[in-house]
Structures are given as structure tokens and as C-alpha cells.
Amino acid sequence: MYADDVENVDHVILSRISLKEISTVSDDDPLDRAQRKSIVVNDERKWRLSYLRSQFESYQLQDLFKLYTKKVNHGYFSLYLILQTLLTITHFSFVLSKNVDDPLPVLPDIILYISTILLSLICLYIIDRVAEKYNRLQYATGAAFCLIFFVNGFIPYYYRGHEHFRPAYSPYLIIACYLFFAINNLTMAVMMGVSVSAFHIATLYFVTYSNLDHMIWKKITSDAIFAFFMNCLGVYYRYMNEIVIRRSFLDRRDSIMSTFLLKHEKKQVDHLMQSIIPEYVINKVKERYIETTKHFIKTGHVLQNPFDNSLLDEHENVSILFADIVNYTEMTGTLKITELLDTLNELFGLFDDCSDKRQVTRIKFLGDCYYCVAGLPPDAATNSAEACVDLGLDMIAIIASVRKKRNLNVNMRIGIHSGKILSGIIGTVKYQFDIWSKDVDIANKMESEGRAGMVHITNITKDLLTKKYLIEPTDKGETVPQFKNCGLKTFLIRPNIEKDPLPSPTSESCPSSPTTTPGRPSIFKKQRSYPSNLTLLQQLQRVPSVIEEDSPKTSSVKIFIDDQKYRHSEERMFRKSKIQNQRASDTRRSTNTLKRRTAFMNNNIKRYNERTNDVNEEMGKSINLISFSKYQQYVKVKDINVLLLFNKWKIEMEYLKIPDALFKYYLLSAAALIICVYIIQNLTLKQWDVTTWPFLATAVPIIFIFLPISWAEYLYNKYIASHGDETPNNILLKCIYKMSGVMTNNFAVRLVIFLMIYISFLVCVMGDVMECRDSLEEEINIIDHNGTSFKTSFLNLLIYRDKDIYNLSMLNCVLPWDSETFNHLLDPQVAHIMSTVFLIITLHLVDRQTDYMNRLDYLLNRKFKFEQNEANLLQKVNENLLVNILPKHVANLYLDVSREQKELYFEEHDNVAVMFASIITEDELQQILDEKEFLTLMNAYILKFDVLTNREQYHNIEKIKIAKWTYMVACGLFDRHTPDAERHQTSSSMHTLLCFASDMFKKLNDVNRQYMQNSRLRIGISHGPIAAGVVGSKKPLYDIWGDPVNMASRMDSTGIPDRIQVLEQTAEVIQKLGYKCTERGNIQVKGKHGKLKTFFVDIDENFNLVREDVYSNGISQKA
């Protein structure tokens, strides 16, 4: 059991690390030069075999790679069978043509070649159509190896008595051991290649050269060196091939991952949108927001008003519900901050669940007020009035259960009205979806005039009800002017106690008459109440935490909660959590067994694991669909033609220009090859010629110039530089370092280097042939080392194929006619040309297969980059949306994929300045303007205020919310990583907020001039310690609580237009900043005993703050 736990812990840690590693780095991110250099180094590292192998540590990935390798092996083995068929047919044709008059001497050869051709074709036909049965492909390759090994040795040994033939297929078979056969073990491949080489040398010694005494040791040594180099070439090809295959596999998986990531980002965008915007406007808002993000990425500027009037919608025949928690202020003064947030999170989360079940759209909640609408598309309730009434009764039942369980004196007061609304989005920073209309105001008034524990409805809503409810009339239609002017009558709906028994509300929760019920004024005129008792902050823990949902939301919501069942269910969720903060968890569990989990941006690790499993499953399907059938590869591939070129020239040029991190390996192989050719050449001469000028002309540039330069950057970054951004300080080394990078990244430079090497190489290889005078001595190994030389040409670039025709024509002109051959009557020059052609075709097809995979990989990378750009854009949208819901430092917490699962997020701030600013319009303005015109005007004000928050000088100001036309901000909500000196500077936060308030007056005045209006601004400011946190299940809301919040609201509501009202202690702080304050006098403030002395912050006619002339005069006396 312990081992399983450890394994689970390791799995979670690995998931976190993986999540952080796949975090996207965008070109628009403020990366400095060092970071960008590190990214380049990491890209080069992706072509190191050791690094690639380290990426396959996951057992699931290993299994997938084995499946992918089988597919690749299938492709190479199919290529081998085609190649073997072509070579054997060619060989058979030449032998038969030379012995057409008397085929009897070569009858065994003919039978053997025909059998090989038939077996190869049959095997090719079978494996190209039964791909899913390749689990035993290695046995087929083993049989093929034995067959060609037998054919290669049969002819020389069969005719050894009277003719001395040379093995025809040894070089080709050596290459096949390393590349074509399904042998995953390198040691086994080397053993097979060495055995072929040993058999080849033995055959030459005992059969081919058995009648020669002169220079036989040179011949055997030359052939042995050639065989050795062929094996080295095979190992090299295998090494490079493994890099290509692993890189191709990872790129294919990345492409699939990017597709899933794109889908995930789109889902996350939808989830984020749904948390702030109803579903029916999501598509319009999403398109507009993506356009805004693209505009910002392209220009660096924010659109002034991305959400214009086109997003305003009218809806008729809807029902509006307002719900308020009765005795909320008392509850905030009683509960600790953790209990308060937990209670609110539970209540509002359950309300959200119920609203979803009833098909009611929650708009928002403001403090203790929760309001929503039924009847909005696309899933509008059949009867909007009944949906709201049922939801109201659900809320009463929920709070009754919470009241009983938590022993709280709370209840719900609910008001409902039906009619028409106008909905839309206001502002560009922390923008919110909201509703407006006279019917909305009536619904809000219905709540404040209602009765606790009952649902207050108008006669319009009552007429829409078809079900039976316990309804009783009220006299509010006659006593409330707003109802009387509209001709409304009101009714109360009582919960069915017999059917749905509820705990009896307290007398304070259910007052008997409106005169004894402290009705709450409209939230559109006055902000909600906030905790007035700050002693609860002393119990705040210093480390913020997050509650996360461990299990998905159930399909149905229980309206009447069984406390015991819920508690047991919650405890099971805690037991399932393997990684969590044990100390916090144990403490919380003992005091709060009931936890409301938030479903927003949670379970990153779980989602990552699920997505990884989905990607692996899709990868398996993709691998099974891969076809390495030669018919599919050469004829039916979509974007690549038969010549292995992209159909679109633009893509072809892009492909040729991509950096080649393997170019240094090509140069290393060329250097090794030229040394090998030099040794073989000298072994064929009478005496060793150290100063052969073709060798020097070729070896010096390769070994002493190009090779060191090509490896300089790699070696320096790996062994000398401690960080990826370091470059050599020495001028010469720095120059070589930069040249190395240019060589890797510049196609033209690589092309020039290749041509120089190739021309020099041809001179080195063909020079001795052209100058040969003694055919007996000099021709011995010309064919072999020329064939070897041709291989290197194929290691660099595929596009240079014309060189083979030139090589063959030169070879045909100078070849001697008295060398060894393969078969009876087969001319030696034909045998040598066949050997060279076999090597050329073999390496060409190998290179073609590799290039085919590279081109497919390139197409996948292009698709991957496109989808990655789309995902990056959506990721930016996600981040911006999240920051538009939560403050940046809180949003970063939710975006941190490595965060552990913890509890409900809250934090403590000691010195915060809070401001409420209400836009006051003329009473008759709404009668003059229609609703859309009025909203356009108000949006213009809000937009100007939002633009202010984007200024650098106001980066510490956090917009909290808009309560209709009251703009609420706070300054000083620093995260825990901010230095303490800055966190505790009240004067700094206050100064910033005062300047912001001054600019708000100016911006409002600008809009007034533009629209020829006379609106005014009324501002209240307070400061002190507050608590902040996130509440809500699927629709989170960041809010702040505390006496400063409450007092800032009261300073606004009791203030005077064009003035900034503050309490005495706030005025003292402002006075210390050098600004003048004038005493207003003592006023009554709700929630405080007795009257409080308040002050106005002085501003001049241009809305600039007025400074004190003499600081020591103190606060100005009452004017």
C-alpha cells in the first residue's frame, strides 16, 4: 500500500513538472535575450540522441514508441524487399543475357535469382496488406537475411573449383543489417554486419583471390578496411536514423497534443466565458474578444470599446429574481473570515447549482445579494415565472439547512418580477454582464420590500403561474409609491411546510410587518453592507489557500440537503486526496467538515493526466493509421509528389531553408570517409604517398576548417558555457562560435560547403583512376573506394542526384577489363558497375525513405505551429479573461499548474484604500433617452474610468466591481511576494487612489462635454485592514470585506456630488500627504453607533487636489 502511495505521489510530481515544461513561450512574452538564447539552445538539444531517449521514460510512451518503431521497420523492410527485387531482376537479366546461347552453366544462378524475386514479391504483397500482424516481423527479416546471405555466398563457393567469383551483395547486405531489418538491438545488428564482413573477407581470401600470390595482403587489407568502414557507415546511418525516428515520433505526438491542447483551450475559453457571460452571447463575445486580443498582439494597443452596442440584447417575457441574505451584517461580525467565506461559498455554490437545474441564469452577486433571470436563450425555462419561484423556494430551503447546521441567525428575502430587460456588457476592465430596465428596478424593490423566509412576487408574475403555491396578498401595491405608480399588486409565497419541512425561522428573521422589517435600499442606489467587525482578521492565516473540487458535479442537485450524507461524502473526498497540505487539511476538517468545492480552473493535474491519456490513445490510433506502403508513399501521398518534392513550391523552399542541426555529423562522416579512402588508395599503390595533393585539397578544408567550425557552438554550449546565453569573450572564438551558428542555420552556406567538399572529393577519388598507368596494380580497389565515396554524397543533401550519372560515366570510361566478376561470362566492368549501382540505389532509397519521413515530420510541424499559435492566442484570451475576473496575483495562482490542492482562497491586507464612486445623472435623463442610448452614455463613463486603470501610475489599483453605476476600486491589494515596506505603506496607496479619483472627475467631465450632459460624480474613500477572497463554485467572484469597505460605501451614499467624502482618520492620512481636507460635520452612518465626523477632500474647479500651504495647521475647520 505504501509503495502505491509513493508511486501516486511520484506520478503527481511528474505531472506537475510536465505541465510546467509544456508551458507555452510566446514571442510576445517579455523574454530577455538570455531567455531567448536558452530557447535556441534547447532546440539544438532536441536533436541529441541522449536527450531524445530521455523523453521516453514514461512506460506508456515506450509502448507507443515500440508500436511506432514497428511501423517504421515495416516501411524499411518493404523498401528492402522492393530493392532486393529490383537488384535481383537486374542481376538476373545481365546473367541471362550473357548466357542466352548456353544457359546451362548458370542454371543454378538463374533458379536462385528467380526464387529470390518470387519470395521477395510474395513477402512484399503480404506485409503491405496485413500490417496489424507485424508482431513477428523480425522473423521475416531474419529469413530474408538468411536468404540473401545464402545467395551472396552460394555462387562463389559453388563455382570455386574452376572459376573465382566475388560475392555480389556484401556491401548491400551490411547496410541492410543496420537499416532494413527489424532489429532493434544495436549489438545484434553489429554482430550480423560483422559476420557478413567476415564471411566476405574469408570468401575473398579462400575463393576469389586464392589463385593470386602477388599483393594479396594489400587486396585483403583494402577490402577489410572497406568492410570495416561499411559497418561504421551502418552504425552511423542507424544513429542518424534513430534521431530522425525519435524526433518524428515526438513531433507527431506534439502535433496531436497541440490539437488536444487547442480543444482544451477552446473548452476553457467557453468555461471562462460562461463564468461571466450567459451562454447565448458567448459566441459573439468570444469572437469580439479574440479580435481584440489579435489587435493588441499586432499593434500593442487596446481597442477603446471592444464591446459596443451590438452586444446589447432586449429580452421580453423574462422573470427577474433578487435574493438577499437577511442579517448578513450580523453574520459577518460573528463568523471568522474562514467560516464566512466558506459559508458564502457554500451558499452561492448551491444557489448556482439550483439555478442551473431550474434553467435560471445567474447574473451576479453583490455582497449578500444574488440576482438572476429566467427566460434567457438558448435553454430558456418553459415558464420563467415558475422557474424563479421554484428557485426562490429552493434558496429558502438551502439557507434553512445552513442555518440549522451552522447555528446562524440568517434567512433569505426574495423578490420576483416579470417583464422586459436589456442585457449587455459594461466596461473593458473587469467587465461584467449585467441587466437593466424598469422591470429590473421593480424586482430589486420587490426584494427589499419582501419578507424573510418568503418569496415576494408581483401580480404580473402571479398571472404566469400554473402550479399551486401557498399565496397570500399584501398591501405593498398601495403603500409603496414605485409599485403604486406602476399599478402593481404584490403577493407573498410561503414555503409548503408540510411538503418541505423547514427549520422554524427566528422572529428577527421573519418580521411580521414592513415597519419592523429593516428593508434594504436598492443596490443600484446604495452599495451592500460589509463586515464591520475587523477583529475577525486577527485569526486570518498568513498563507493563502484554495479549495478544489475532487469529484465532478453530479447530474442532479438535491434541493433539500441531508447534512449527514453530505458530511460523509465530503470526508470521502478528503480521503481520496493524496497530495494536500496535511496541517491545514486536518485543522480545517476538525472545524469545517462541510466544504463547498470550487469548480473553477481547478484540478490542473487531473486534467493534464486525462489529456495525456487521451493524447496517448489518439497517438496509438494515429500510428495504426500510418502507412509505409510504397504505393501509398510514392503515389497516394497528398502534399508530396512522386519526385519527393512538396506540391507547393513555397513549402519546398521553406523546407530547404530550415536549420540543420545534424550538419556537423555529415561533415564528421565526410572527414572519416576521406581518411578511409586515402588509406585504401595508398594500399593499391606500389609505395605510400603521404603528400597526395587531392587528399590534401580535400582533407584540409574538411578536417581543419569546416569540421571544427561546425562543432564549435555545440561543444561550447555543452562543456564550457554554464548558461545557454553565454558567448565566448575571445574575439577569435566568438567569431568561430557565430560562424558555427550560421553554418547550422543558413541553407546557402551549407550548400556552398557541400559543393566545395564534393568537388574536392571527386578529385580525390577519381584522380588516381584518371592517372592510372598500370592496370594490374592500380585497379585493385578502385571500385570499392569509389563506391564508398559515393555514399558520403548522400549524407548531406538529397537534391544533388545528378552526381551519380557523372560518377558512373567516369567509372565506365576508365575501368579495367581484367578484374573479378560475379557470375559466369559476366564482364568485370559490368559487375563493377552493378556493384556501384547497387550501393547508389541502396543509399538513395534509404535517403529517400529518411527524407520522406522528414517531410512528413515537417508537415506535422507546420500544422503543430499553426495550432500552437491558435492555442497561444486562446491561452492569452484565457489569461486575460481570468485577469478580468480576478486580480492579477490571484489569477496567477489559478494559472499556476504546479500549485497543490488546498482550500478556499482568502488573504489578509493590512493597509488598503477603498473607493466607491457613483455616477449621478439627472432624474429626467432616463425619460428623455431610450434605454440603449442611456446605456451607451453610462458605458462611455465606465469606459473612461477603465482606461485610467490601464495607466502605469495606477497599476496598483484593482477594479472590484460595478454595482449598476457605482464604480468600486481598491488600492493596496498586494500579493504576498510584494516587499513588506510597500505592503504597509498606507500613504502610498492613499495617494494613488486620490490621484485616480481626481482623474475620474476629469474623465467624467470629458464625457459630459462629448455627449452634452451634466452628470456628476460622488466619491467616498476609506482605508484600513480588509479581507479578500474568492467565492462561487462555477462562477467565481473576487470580493473584499471589512469595515473600510463598508465605510467607503457609506461615505459615497451619504456624500455630495462633485465631492470626495472621508472619515476623520482617513483625512489625517490625506493631510500628511500634503492635501487639504475640510470638515463637513457629524453625520449619521448606518452600522455605526452615534454620528461620525466626516471631511471633504478639497479639489479646485479643474478637479485637481488642493495642497495645504502650511502642513502644521492641521485639518481645516468646518467651512
Image (spheres, rainbow, N blue to C red):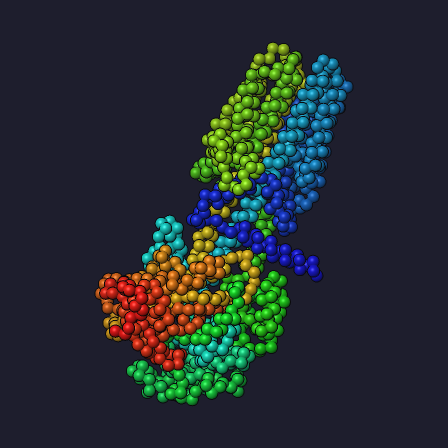
Q: Is residue 254 or residue 447 the one in the foreground?
A: 447
Farthest residue, direction top? 773
- Residue drawn at the location 72% of the way across and 20% of the way down: 208
Above or below residue 679? Residue 57 is below
Q: Is residue 555 or residue 4 the one in the foreground?
A: 4
**In-image side of 184 versus 967 (left or right):** right
**In-image side of 216 versus 782 (left or right):** right
- Residue drawn at the location 55% of the way across and 53% of the way down: 19
Above or below residue 196? Residue 246 is below
- Please state the total of marks drawn on the protein image: 0
- Residue drawn at the location 54% of the way across and 45% of the way down: 251
Give residue 784's quadrant in the image.
Answer: top right
Give residue 388's quadrant in the image.
Answer: bottom left
Residue 253, horizontal then vertical, whole percent: 56, 48
Residue 467, horizontal then vertical, whole percent: 45, 82
Q: Is residue 259 or residue 873 the one in the foreground?
A: 873
Give residue 1047's quadrant in the image.
Answer: bottom left
Is residue 1083 visible to us here?
Answer: yes
Is residue 357 visible to us here?
Answer: no
**In-image side of 986 versus 901 (left or right):** left
Above or below residue 760? Residue 1102 is below
- Residue drawn at the location 48% of the way across and 56% of the way down: 265
Residue 536, horizontal then vertical, whole percent: 49, 73
Farthest residue, direction front? 1112
Which quadrant does the N terminus fall into?
bottom right
Residue 923, horizontal then vertical, whole percent: 26, 74
Which quadrant does the C terminus fall into?
bottom left
